[in-house]
Image (tube, rainbow, N blue to C red):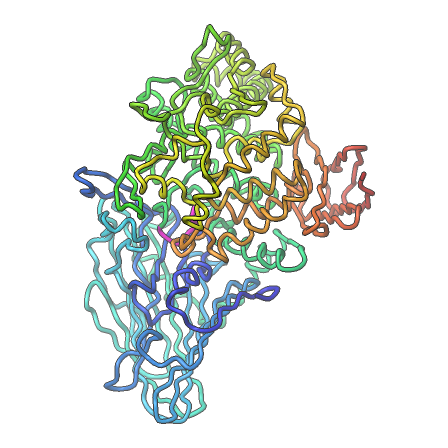
Amino acid sequence: MTGWTWEHEGYDPADARLRESLCTLGNGYFATRGALPECPADEVHYPGTYAAGCYNRLASRVAGRQVENEDMVNLPNWLPLRFRLPDEPWLSPDTATVLEHGETLHLSTGLLERRTRYGLGAGRALLVRQHRFVHMADPHLAGLRTEFTAEGFSGTLQTEAALDGGVTNAGVPRYRDLDGRHLTHVLTGTAAADTVWLRCRTRTSDVRVALAARLTSPAPVTDRHDPPRVCQTTRLDLAAGRPVAVDKIVALHTSRDPAISDPLHAAVDRVGRAAGFDALLAPHLTAWDQLWRRAELDVPGEAGRILRLHLFHVLQTLSPHTADLDVGVPARGLHGESYRGHVFWDELFVLPYLNLHFPEVSRALLHYRHRRLERARTAARDAGHKGALYPWQSGSDGREETQQLHLNPRSGRWLPDHSHLQHHVGSAIAYNVWQYCEAGGDEEFLHTKGAEMLLQISRFWADSATYDERLGRYRIKGVVGPDEYHDAYPDAAGPGLDDNAYTNVTAAWVLARTLDVLRGLPEPRGRELAERTGLDAGELDAWDHISRTLHVPFHDGVISQFEGYGELAELDWRGYRRRYGDIRRLDRILEAEGDTVNRYQASKQADVLMLGYLFSPAELQGVFRRLNLNLDERTWRRTVDHYLHRTSHGSTLSGLVHGWVLARARRADAWKFCQEALQADIADIQGGTTGEGIHLGAMAGTLDLVQRGLTGLETRGGALWLDPVPLPGLSSYGFTLRYHGHWGVRLRLERGLLEIAVPESGRNPIEVHLPDRAVRLQPGETDRLVLPD
């Protein structure tokens, strides 16, 4: 690991899947895992390619039940390029002698470099060097240059490049009982002497996919069609010590693309007009340089290097190209097939970062939710409620994609999955609407699509709340909170919990913010919205009342995760750690023992403490005051301590949230959790999960930890509010952001000083609030502010 490179030395099959995920290259439109081109998909390697938003639905027979699952489709593999000496086996690191192997991910340029020296016996060796890109300027192009150097011999080398349509979704072992054959009607053809193509379609969603590949070689190229593959072969004459290169340029299109009529014609035309490998590099490098300038991040040491890797993968999944697509935030990026490529609530951890760098991408991701508003309203009606019920897992069309069954690898049992009861995803969407509009000042979106989503989400919460005469408060029953471990009461006949504190508090916040938005609409727009939705003053009054009287349970002087949580048994944490070591997936351990985590005060990840992640201390106290409840600093600190000791951290988001919360509540312990969040994927702390795809929410969340968490940065009321929290492990850092039309606003914190520089422009000044004062900075001004102790 250096400042701008990520290096992997040596070849170890056990690390291949992890390396392939971390070496994925993408551009927001599609991405390809960092697999070696000469290695097919097997138990060691998995060369997946995924286009954003390309899904297909299949039915499978599992545990005696017919279940449907929609997956992000593994598209035809464009990588294959293998090589051998005449009449010898094809060379690969799994079958041949590897004298030297290394891969370098160049973050600044979006290039993956590999270097392998194969031993051929009798003092002979073949050096293979490759450079690969997935083009950041033209989102439909990718390139692979392979350079061969004979050492200790001269002779012929046979190479074979291919497009392979015989792929399946098989990248996650626990999904292998499910049908993964998503592609059908695979056809191949020749477009020119050096160019071949492959087309296919998905089996049920009927998305047409086309790839075209151009092979440039110093020797003649011949092609062979053997569907579902098409191959291009060339025989290279190697002279000892003299490198010979073969270039493969590929174009990918699907029928989901705008402004095309036929994916095959578009792919063939694009690859035919594409420049050579070297000429294509120039615009690719320029595009990456511009991205790094817009998301400039200056953090010293190892933390800074890891944050740069995280930013690299965020930008590959959600780039400015994403702004032209109808896609959401895939929880595992475009890096693998875990979670089937579904969209969860991870945008809650991603959009706050994007809002201040790439607001056009945030807006597009919110458009994805708005386009599925009618589907969410249908789901609410089907559940017997008004408003909009967004799904816990979303895919192509916004229906609930949460699996009906999930496999416990420890016990081998398929179990009912009740995570679709996480209705709090609606509050996450509302939160992102509000944060996006506050950060960017996009009143047009707030007054139109944003207001419509807020209204329908609030309507669902108000209709879901039932009044309890005994408590004199409203209650929301039958849900699952962010913890996810608890999905039912012990020995209950059905799933669901009552009055999850996070759900109720965020619902109250959403109702209050929606009232603010609706009352602030221009009168003509407000009238239009009321006419379209049947909204009246009586409904608004009811929302106001509910937002002030939702029930939040407490026990022993702390906020209860849900009603009855305090009555659950305590777990023998020390005993379980002694017996199992890693107990992050405590739910699987207990189920395999015939027990259930529903019986214990034990959480997978932050639940109540998520409130401290979403809201500043002052804002959280304000929400509780509106509920006529007291949340003083001592109560919150006790709450933090209570759950900190009862959480197994079975999610990469857990360390992130705890680090964020502890930075305010217990500063000395915060850095340990911040480091865990930074290590989540590079060290694969969840035990093999990173090889199935990176954790995009955790990666973006670590960036936002520096941007908003440690600075106390809030965007509200047309101003920047800052309340920095210096941590021993990270007290000096800087970054740029984009705020209300100001591009490249620089913030730097160091030794009790905050420096803010606003670039020259014709924009209005920026108002900045610190705990003890406020300043206004004109464009072109730089101010150095001494921070209060």
The answer to which of 589 and 118 lies nearer the viewer is 589
- Seen at 40% across and 57% down, the residue is 691
- Seen at 19% across and 38% down, the residue is 66
385 relative to 159, above or below: above
In the image, residue 699 lies in the stretch drawn in magenta = no
Which corner quadrant of the image does residue 57 belong to?
A: top left
Report the span colored magenta. Answer: 330-337
Residue 314 spot, x, y in % from top left: 51, 51
Residue 41 spot, x, y in % from top left: 30, 63
- Seen at 57% across and 20% down, the residue is 521
Q: Is residue 452 visible?
A: no
Which corner quadrant of the image does residue 477 belong to?
A: top left
The answer to which of 265 and 250 lies nearer the viewer is 250
In the image, residue 333 lies in the stretch drawn in magenta = yes
601 relative to 658, above or below: above
Indicate left or right for 290 with 749 as reference: left
Residue 155 spot, x, y in % from top left: 33, 92
Q: How many marks?
A: 0
